[in-house]
Image (spheres, rainbow, N blue to C red):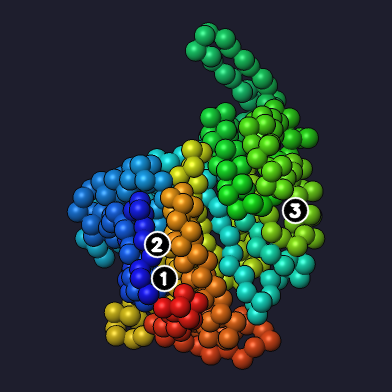
Amino acid sequence: MEKIKMTTPLVEMDGDEMTRILWKMIKDELILPFVDLKTEYYDLGLPYRDKTSDQVTIDSANATKRLGVAVKCATITPNVQRMSEYNLHQMWKSPNGTIRAMLDGTVFRTPITIPSIHPAVKFWKKPITIARHAYGDVYRDVEIQTTEPGVAKLVFEGASGERIEEVIHEFSGPGVIEGMHNTDASIRSFAHSCFKYALDVKQTLWFATKDTISKKYDGRFKAIFEEVFQEYKDAFEKAGIEYFYTLIDDAVARVMRSEGGFIWACKNYDGDVMSDMVSTAFGSLAMMTSVLVSPDGKYEYEAAHGTVTRHYYKYLKGEETSTNPMATIFAWSGAFRKRGELDNLPELVNYANQLEQACFDTLNEGLETKDLVNLSEGITPKGLTSLQFLQEIRKRLEVRLGA
Ligand code: NAP
Ligand code: MG
């Protein structure tokens, strides 16, 4: 078989620990034998981030802005323990946080579903994608705890000299006060990313807030979404999808009764909470994919899980691990598909689809990594090491591609 051609390189962001080991295995078994791979390589492994004073992370984000599509391996976010483990010069910030801020992007998380793993919610037949607004609200609040009676006010001093003042509460005893904010610009970026992604995957978009209670704050979210939607309305109609707004409590009830197969855009706190609920209900963190989408349509694909440290320490002792590579494979397939669509390379799109199907073939035959074995119903699964699992996928991919 002649290797599949690429024209524009992918931005390749390598990472840490067990996922770095999987990264190479995936390339060797499932990519390099089939694709004439073109990437711009950035090593976001912690040692090199430290060596470059994190400049490599910034360079990789800029490359994503330039080239449009990136694929990222999981990376360590340093804490005190990592400082000594890696002898770091500084406690570098989370690469995901840096990249997200530079791209002004929204993260979409989607579970990979298979027939033998049943979601905890019996109605769910298709994946539900959660999009979390990752700026402001409670996460950038200021809080006061008071110990005596008094008056709390909300004051805005405009650059023009305008002054707005509202009494929050007249306290007759101790209490708590919280001030939070968001910006039109951030909400608008969030809306653009959501509408773009919905069109991309051709799925209906839900958005929900509590605008009946929070008339100005949540009302602003609702209004901006409605306004931005006007730019996408025709395209949505053409794609046969909808934008659907409702109250958050109504959304929760409807989600539980739904079949899935849509995107649920959430405000920051709702997304924090609901993404944990939805991912747990779908089964496994190892089967959750993630893509960062910027408002101007740049994409960074990755797995939702971390670097699987416990498995890495076993690997270092020479043990073969059964770490699940699915989410990382799907990060690559997502990136190839997007690159193929942008560059008009149907063979690359086909490769991405066949790669995913080969993974499903393997899992549906009961060949799985150990994390999935206990979750599987209706089949007799066999637990494989990561390498064995990748080799089984490769066999099926070769057949599918006629290689
Ligand atoms: P984690 O790496 O996701 O692992 C948590 C546990 O979940 C693992 O110990 C493992 O359970 C299970 N697991 C996760 N992915 C799996 C897979 N692919 N196959 C099999 N089991 C899997 O989270 P963490 O331990 O909290 O974080 C480890 C490091 O990752 C930290 O340094 C953190 O900063 C980083 N992190 C990075 C990202 C990112 O780059 N996007 C995201 C989250 C965390 P068992 O051990 O029970 O088998
Ligand atoms: Mg959470």
Name the residue tied to disc 2. 74
Quadrant showing the C terminus: bottom left
**Is the C-beta separation of discs 2 and 1 under 8 Å?**
yes
The x, y position of residue 344, in whole percent, is 46, 51
Foreground residue among 342 and 314: 342
The x, y position of residue 118, in whole percent, is 68, 75
Residue 308 marker: 1
The x, y position of residue 38, in whole percent, is 31, 58
Q: Earlier in the sequence, mark 2 or mark 1?
A: 2
Picture residue at 75% right of the left edge, 53% below the top? 252
Residue extending farthest left: 51
Picture residue at 66% right of the left edge, 20% below the top? 166
Image vertical order of residue 128 relative to residue 172, above or below: below
Give the mark toward the camera: 2 or 1.
2
Picture residue at 56% right of the left edge, 57% below the top? 109
Secondary structure, mark 1, is loop
In the image, the residue with mark 2 has its CB under 8 Å from the nearest atom of ligand 1: yes
Q: Quadrant of residue 155?
A: top right
Secondary structure, mark 3, is helix
Secondary structure, mark 2, is loop
Q: Quadrant of residue 328?
A: bottom left
Q: Quadrant of residue 207?
A: top right
Residue 194 visible to the viewer: no
In the image, the residue with mark 1 has its CB under 8 Å from the nearest atom of ligand 1: yes
Q: Which amino acid is tagged 2?
A: Ala
Foreground residue among 54 and 189: 189
Q: Which amino acid is tagged 3?
A: Val
Residue 252 marker: 3
Residue 25 marker: none
